[in-house]
Amino acid sequence: MWLLYESRGCGYLCEGDIDLEVSKKPKIITLKGHSIELQRKHVKNINLAVYPATGRIRVSVPERMDEEHVVKFLESKLGWIRRQLAKTKPKIPISYESGSTHQLEGKSYILNLMPDASSNRIRLHETHIDLYLQVGRSSEHVPKMMKEWCRARLKARVQPLMSKWQRVLGVEVSSWNVKQMKTKWGSCNTRDKRIWLSLELAKKSDEYLEYVIVHELVHLLERGHNAHFYALLDQYLPDWRQRKALSAFGQQ
Ligand SMILES: [Zn+2]
């Protein structure tokens, strides 16, 4: 929830290329029970952001602005901050009941729970996912089974794309892996040449997955989101804009 937002390229996608700023540890201002991260930056305005999902509050201010002024500003915005925080809703857990809908690889599937099976397993069909639960297994196991199954499928899709694009771009990663990431599709640590991909990508089509992989790998050629970076994307993946438009984080 941004009040004022300073736009920096497509920063939602990566962490790797904002290392420079992360290295400047934010100072914490405590105000009426709220902890607010203060970051001094090369900016003209005060930028205040509240992230309702995590309760994080961040303010970035011009490098030389005195703290008293910042505190006065924050005090004047306290009502707004509290209203944003009040909007915080706990994330609705995805239902794993029979008949629930699940996104997988760019499509929607209906989940069917098949209890009392001889073994735990999951089968994918044209329109539905059959999840077989072993005799005596409670449905509590379903979310974990689904998550592990999605993770394995995603990794199997990523593997050939990683190989292909490392070859095409002439880069080499030291490792890549999949993990749950709250706000990003992927990140690239350009120093260690390590790439993380969000487990959420299991829901996305091959076109989108490939775009994220190419984006992260291009960071091994160009760290920042600058003209050179986008020129490389244009060169290697000319339709990257259409692919990117396929999805915003958290949407299906
Ligand atoms: Zn990036």
Image (cartoon, rainbow, N blue to C red):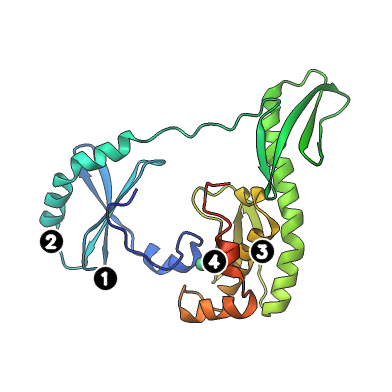
Q: Residue at x 31, y 33 (%)?
A: 86
The residue beneath circle 3 is 210
Alpha-carbon distance for marks 2 and 3?
A: 46 Å
The residue beneath circle 4 is 189
Splitting the image into 4 quarters, where does residue 31 fall?
top left
Ligand 1 lies under 8 Å from the Cβ of mark 4: no
Q: Residue 20: give x, y in percent of width and height.
A: 40, 69
Is 135 drawn above or below residue 96 in the view shown? Answer: above
Residue depth check, mark 4 versus mark 1: number of the one nearer the observer: 1
Ligand 1 lies under 8 Å from the Cβ of mark 3: no
Q: Secondary structure at mark 3?
A: helix
**What amino acid does circle 2 point to?**
Asp
Q: Say whether disc 1 or disc 2 marks the residue closer to the N-terminus.
A: 1
Q: Say whether disc 4 or disc 3 marks the residue closer to the N-terminus.
A: 4
Alpha-carbon distance for marks 4 and 1?
A: 24 Å
Give residue 229's mark: none
**What amino acid does circle 4 point to?**
Asn
**What amino acid does circle 1 point to?**
His
Residue depth check, mark 4 versus mark 3: number of the one nearer the observer: 3
Which sits in the foreground, 129 or 186? 129
The residue beneath circle 1 is 42
CB contact under 8 Å: marks 1 and 2 = no
